[in-house]
Image: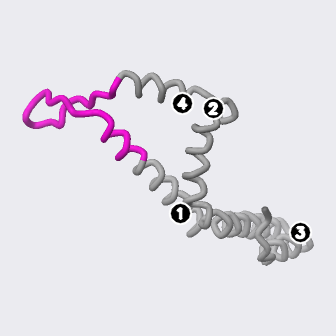
Amino acid sequence: MVNLEMLAAAQHEIWSRWMRWMFAQGYFRRTSPKSPGDWVMPEGKAERWMRQMNTEYADLSEEERESDRKVVREHMPQFPTACEEIRREILMSAADRAKARGGIIWESMLREMAEETDVQD
């Protein structure tokens, strides 16, 4: 599952960049010397982000959708390879199950499909 890990790593990078940016928008209010304290988010940003997280993508403004597209474009080169590897793994797993059940024709067909290298758009 190498390429599943690639997609998971991309997702983590997206999330961690967002968290670094988000934390830079607020501040920590210390509650004790041994803890970082409470993080305080500016009210306007909290309202906007709550609205965005409760809004379907299609209902976001064009500017908000473009912001999401920008993040996807940055990670797009990883998608075809990862998706192709995941497709192969699924087909090979299905072929193994078919073989175990005595489905020789299904096994052969699934293995042939798994070996196709064209990435579908």
Three-letter residue code for mark 3: Trp
Magenta region includes residue 21: yes
Residue located beneath label 2 in the image: 60
Q: Position of residue 19 (x, y in %)?
A: 38, 44
Q: Give SS at disc 1.
A: helix
- The residue that label 3 is drawn on is 106
> What range of the chain is rendered magenta?
18-42
Specify which label sits upstream in the sequence, 1 or 3: 1
Say if mark 3 contacts mark 4, CB within 8 Å.
no
Q: Earlier in the sequence, mark 3 or mark 2?
A: 2
Dot in front, 1 or 3: 1
Identify which amino acid the numbered label 4 is placed on: Met
Mark 1, residue position: 5
Residue picked out by circle 4: 53
Q: Residues within 10 Å of mark 3 (few under 14, many from 20)?
A: some
Q: Examine the rendered structure and indicate whether residue 48 appears above or below residue 77.
A: above
Cα separation between marks 1 and 2:
29 Å
Indicate the position of residue 27 as horizontal and vertical percent values: 24, 33
Nearer the observer: mark 4 or 2; the answer is 2
**Disc 2 crowd, CA 10 A, few/some/many (<14, 14-19, 20+):** some
- Categorize mark 1 by other alpha carbons within 10 Å: few (<14), some (14-19), many (20+): few
User: Is residue 105 left or right of 59 when viewed as pictured?
Assistant: right
Closer to the N terminus: mark 1 or mark 4? 1
Q: Amino acid at mark 1?
A: Glu
User: What type is the residue that disc 2 sits on?
Assistant: Leu
Q: Quadrant of residue 84?
A: bottom right
